[in-house]
Image (tube, rainbow, N blue to C red):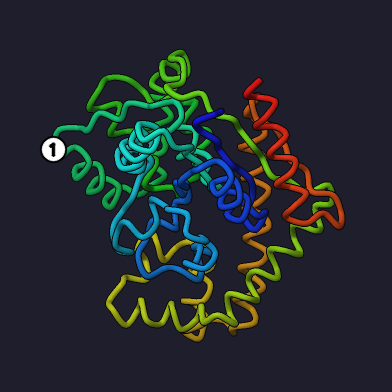
Amino acid sequence: MSSIICIAGPTASGKTALAVSLAKELDGEVISCDSMQIYKDMDIGTAKPTLDEMEGVPHHMLSVVEPWEDFSVSRYCEMATPILDDILARGKTAIIAGGTGLYMDSLIRGNDFAPFPATGMREKLEAKADELGMEAMLSELAAIDPETAKRLHLKDRKRIIRALEVYYETGQTITQHNKKTQEVPPRYQPVWLGLDFADRQELYRRIDMRVELMLQQGLVEEIRSLLDKGIPKKCTAMQAIGYKEFVDALDGVITIEEAAAKVQQSSRHYAKRQLTWFRRNENMRWLTRQSGDGADKILSLARQVVQETDK
């Protein structure tokens, strides 16, 4: 039997339900692979599974950091790898489910993220960015690592500074680091299951309905509570889709209805990006939901793939 199953796919595609069903059948535990569900007190807007939805199946990497904390792929792997190894050591099936492709790929590859010494380089780069602006920082990166600079947006301050920091601390560009990483065989060999829809409009309908349900469940109140606790509006967690739009609504910049429409549109765009990311994985076995297919049909397709892989 496969000891690791990765369930990937766009937002609102049914990953949680499939993960729980497979875990119950295969004596498994679920590791969430979602860059937003890691935050405490951010439950409704991240579609974090409830206790009822977990159906008694142990879930890991949910609500593990405070909303004001910065989080990264390296920290995710540092926390999730021992959990994954422990599940395997106990003879259980590890089911990694989520839509954050970078986190999932890095965990499976076993990427090595050596911590940089506290030399003050990042602080120097931050100060330089404040003084000269991000256009100058991106130009500096383009001279060092044109490939990385080309794919980074001017507004992506965090990644631009990170790329410069990596170069100045190691003498190696992010592009060189990534190429080396790709040459190393993956640490784990999972079964890859990808969720998609034959009719893209069906996925979009599910996304729209999810946003409406979040509002009914009290998303605006959840955000107001976070702000009342002093969570900064500009912190990474509050800039996520489903939060920043309603912060604007609470500030009176837009209406609740306009915020909801923005969340629905941004979520649809995000779903496209997720599918693009996961389609690059040649090992992904796609489970395509046809019109009228329920969760049972998808579970049956997943079961077939797992059984085929075990032969």
| Rendered residue at 37%/70% (across/down) | 41
Q: Is residue 82 left or right of residue 307?
A: left
217, 189: nearer the viewer: 189
Residue placed farthest to the right in the image? 291
* Three-letter code, disc 1: Ala
Nearer to the camera, 122 or 143: 122
Residue 127 x %, y %: 22, 48
What residue is drawn where x is 15% and y is 33%?
Answer: 117
In screen coordinates, is 167 left or right of 275?
Answer: left
> In the rendered image, which residue does mark 1 sit on?
118
Quadrant housing the C terminus: top right
Which residue is nearer to you in this view: 61 or 158? 61
State which quadrant residue 225 falls in: bottom left
Say above or below: 185 vs 3.
above
- Whether residue 163 sits left or right of residue 283 in the image: it is left
**Is residue 136 visible from the viewing direction of this image?**
no
x and y, in percent, of residue 187 in the image: 42, 22
Task: Please state the horizontal and vertical placement of residue 262, each as a whole percent of the image.
Answer: 63, 69
Residue 156, above or below 49: above
Which residue is depicted at the point 44% across and 37% down? 92
User: Can residue 8 be spotted in the picture?
Assistant: yes
Q: Secondary structure at mark 1?
A: loop
> Looking at the image, which residue is at 39% across and 26% down?
110
In which quadrant is the N terminus drawn? top right
| Disc 1: CA contacts within 10 A as few (<14), some (14-19) or many (>=20) | few
- Residue 285 occupies quadrant: top right
